[in-house]
Image: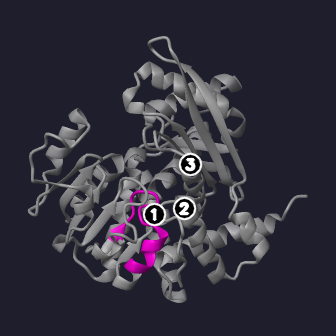
Amino acid sequence: MNQQVASEDNPYAAMQARLDLASARLGLEPNLIAILRTCEREITISMPVVMDDGSVQVFEGFRVQHSTARGPAKGGIRFAMNVNRDEVRALAAWMTWKCAVVNVPFGGGKGGVVCDPFKMSKGELERVTRRYVTGILDMLGPDRDVPAPDMGTDGQVMAWFMDTYSMHRRSYLPASVTGKPIDLGGSLGRVEATGRGVMLCAREALKHLGMNPNECTAAIQGAGNVGLISALQLARIGVKVVAISDVHGGLYNKDGLDLAGLRKHLKVQRKLDGFQDGDRISNNELLELPVDILVPAATENVITSRNAERIQARIIVEGANGPVTANADKILDDKGTFVVPDILANAGGVTVSYFEWVQDRMSFFWTQKEVEERMEHIMVDSFAATVDMAQRFKESNRIAAYMLGVDRVAETTRMRGIYA
């Protein structure tokens, strides 16, 4: 079963197309599908901010809550020039299904500000953050909507976020946001969580396919937190990482990259430029390398109907949200590519965000070993449940994951009923 998306690059249309396929396979009633296809709450704000030179710049910000049927909305805040409402809607919906796939009691939300955080001073970034929090304040709260970092944001931004919210509520509320520094109630293991989850899914996929990690190669698109940690974690289980890239391009070394040296280089330079360990390649060339595992861990829509036929990897583990378009799904399925979809593969981050939220509410914190053991248990069980669903319904892993998540959200919505 396949459904073409007319506007292939629209992530919200792609999400809805996959939702429709999963809903049809589950036999959901039309009224319920109508609810699940629609975001509950959206806000767009204009944010005048005084810049360092005294000028005033007006930024545009968004926050979308797709579903709160299973718990508070959960989702990151993205600071980027290309943020738009449909992207935020799609990311919010993916968070709904992601939280349901790993069975944590959150719904889906997402936010964004149209800006370039890398061209702003620390003071400007703080003022943008605090103005954004104030603009969406009524949507937020530990029991309503719990943001986290995403592209262009980090623990410091989350610290400002939490402080602004707490000041307005006249109370110290660390559970209002996750991804915070450890000293402000952050969780051990949170920084590594998404990349470690990618590794766990890759490990389980190799096990499922009878492949030996020590005989496998991997290429990683993305050298940020998710991409770099995915590479380091894959190397820990014996996989040879032969390529990695950032927005400017990539590096390829058939004998394996010096990941320890790369990590030190990125810590200082924040980009691959200047690191001498292999041949320069483009991001498109990296995607098409003859490797066993491909981890697209950068952004949406990098594997499309235009290049899917040339993808050679046996396994794709989606570290980013929406890296494969809906129109590329059937091409990869027909090729026999084993895809671990984003709503499963990168769910390690939201799983440990849930742990952070729980720890903040208890004011009792776990060791890193406890965090990692709990996360591994959830990720391995969720992988097994997804593969089992795929085999039972003879569906792709992606549609199986959607079915798993959508079914849980639908059942909760059904039990809660429609308030009128």
| Residue 338 x/y as whole percent | 36, 77
Q: Is residue 378 visible?
A: no
**Rounded to the nearest whole Å, what is the CA distance between mark 2 and mark 3?**
10 Å
List the residue tagged with mark 3. Answer: 75
Q: Per the image, is 277 magenta?
A: no
> Residue at point 48% right, 17% down?
51
Residue located beneath label 2 in the image = 98
Residue drawn where x is 60% and y is 76% of the image = 22
Q: Distance of mark 3 from mark 1, alpha carbons?
A: 14 Å
Residue 328 visible (yes or no): yes
Which region is colored magenta?
A: 316-332
The crowding category of the residue bearing disc 2, from other C-alpha atoms within 10 Å (few below 14, some 14 to 19, many at least 20), is: many
Q: Amino acid at mark 1?
A: Asp
In the picture as drawn, the residue positioned furthest to the top comes out as 54
Local secondary structure at mark 2: helix
Q: Looking at this rendering, what residue extends furthest in the front direction?
A: 6
> To which residue does mark 1 refer?
342
